[in-house]
Amino acid sequence: MNKTKLTLYVDKEISEKAKKISKITGKSISNIVSDFIYKQYLESNNFEISEKVEKWIGIANSKAGESYKKLRDKIYEEKLKKYEGTS
């Protein structure tokens, strides 16, 4: 797949959180943003996401019916709390 440069402007707080998430997940910020945009595209077009693709793009599902977005945010918050105060 050909790549192209995309410049984003975000609040400093978001930038710092993105760096921490990158460190926690081992993914580059570019990959995190790309995965997010791809998931949004699939959701907006009501595409079914296969189990293999879910693993590949890091979607988390909950057996209790909690949406993956809430579960993902909860997991990121827990990990960010662990790394707060570190640089």
Image (cartoon, rainbow, N blue to C red):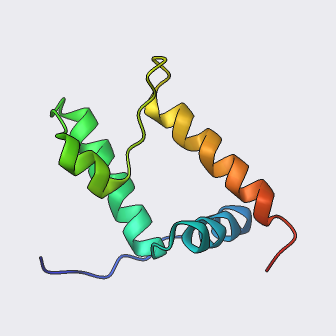
Number of numbered discs overlaid on the protein picture: 0
Q: Position of residue 41 (x, y in %)?
A: 25, 44
Which quarter of the figure has residue 27? Answer: bottom left
Q: Residue furthest front?
A: 63
- Residue 84, compared with residue 51, is above or below; it is below
- Horizontal and vertical percent for residue 20? 66, 69
Judged left or right of residue 46, residue 7 is right
In the picture, which quadrant includes the C terminus? bottom right
Please give the name of the residue rendered at 61% of the width and 45% of the height, measured from the top-left corner: 75
Residue that sits furthest to the right in the current view: 85
Could you tell me residue 11's position as x and y percent?
A: 67, 64
Residue drawn at (50%, 22%) of the image = 66
- Residue 38: give x, y in percent of width and height: 27, 53
Q: What residue sits 16% from the left and 33% below the top?
A: 48
Q: Is residue 53 left or right of residue 17?
A: left
Question: Residue 80 is drawn in which quadrant?
Answer: bottom right
Q: Residue furthest top?
A: 65
- With 9 as the anchor, is 58 left or right in this view? left
In the displayed image of the protein, which residue is found farthest to the left? Answer: 1
Q: Quadrant of the N terminus?
A: bottom left
Rendered view: 58 above or below 65:
below
